[in-house]
Amino acid sequence: MRILLVEDEVALSDALVQIFHKNKYIVDACYDGESGLDNALSGIYDMIVLDVMLPRMNGLDVLREIRAQKLNTPVLLLTAKDTVSDKVKGLDVGADDYMTKPFSSDELLARIRSLYRRNANVIFENVLTWSDLTLNLSTYELFCGKNSFKLGLKEFSMMELFLKNGSRILSKETLINKIWGYESDAENNNVEVYVSFLRKKLAHMKSKVAIKTVRGVGYCLEEKE
């Protein structure tokens, strides 16, 4: 499971990162609302743990924008406010669950597991599905009916992003940042090469899914008629 943690209290953030790592979760930590939103909109996370009181952009505004962008990633809010009205406000904005500080790490992990199970895009067999495609997140195998390919690391990372975002457009910049890294020298043609690799595999498997080029914007998945 990949978790995005958005928490400005460095000591708490560091402690949570250690807890998540101990439980075999991949975690990225952000310390302000704007960077948290930027990462959240990449669509690569299975879970977002979001503090309400954040610098630069508060957690509720971050959550509003996440939901406005039609991103359904489960969000667990963390806050020091424990009134019923505060909880109702967070849930109404689009939170899937709500925890008040201080909290038990065991309870936090239990709630995360519960939200993960409820997420329609990720199921227990550790696979992602979209239309007639299934991607095994453990073996890097892409299936379409009885046909399959074992993907390389870059191909897998790109296909995972596409399946998690579906018809939502991903820019080349987003793909570069999330697959090669922010400090990478990768360029647009690197993205084009791997999109081409995936398109050939989809065609070979006779999938009804295509990677559509949205000129001047990026790529998204579409179902062929």
Image: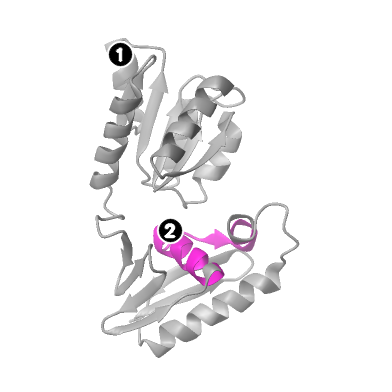
Q: Residue at x 42, y 87 (%)?
A: 203
| Image x and y of residue 120, in percent | 26, 52
Majority secondary structure of the magenta segment? helix
Residue 169 within the segment the image draws in magenta: yes
Q: Is residue 114 above or below residue 151?
A: above
Find the magenta span and give its range.
Answer: 154-176
Q: Residue 151, can we see it?
A: yes
Place residue 160 in its image quadrant: bottom left
Q: Which residue is mark 1?
A: 85
Q: Nearer the viewer, residue 49 or 71?
A: 49
Residue 170 within the segment the image draws in magenta: yes
| Image x and y of residue 211, in percent | 47, 74
Name the amino acid, label 2. Answer: Asn
* Res. 129 mark: none
Place residue 75 in its image quadrant: top left
Q: Tag 1's secondary structure? A: helix
Q: Which residue is mark 2?
A: 165
Name the amino acid, label 1. Answer: Ser
Q: Residue furthest right?
A: 185
Q: Earlier in the sequence, mark 2 or mark 1?
A: 1
Instruction: Determine crowd level at label 1: few under 14, some 14-19, many 20+ residues with C-alpha closer than 10 A.
Output: few
Find the distance from the CA under tag 2 to the CA under tag 1: 33 Å
Q: Residue at x 48, y 33 (%)?
A: 18
Instruction: Determine crowd level at label 2: few under 14, some 14-19, many 20+ residues with C-alpha closer than 10 A.
Output: many
Q: Residue furthest front?
A: 22
Residue 87 is left or right of residue 189, and the answer is left
Q: Nearer the viewer, residue 66 or 126?
A: 126
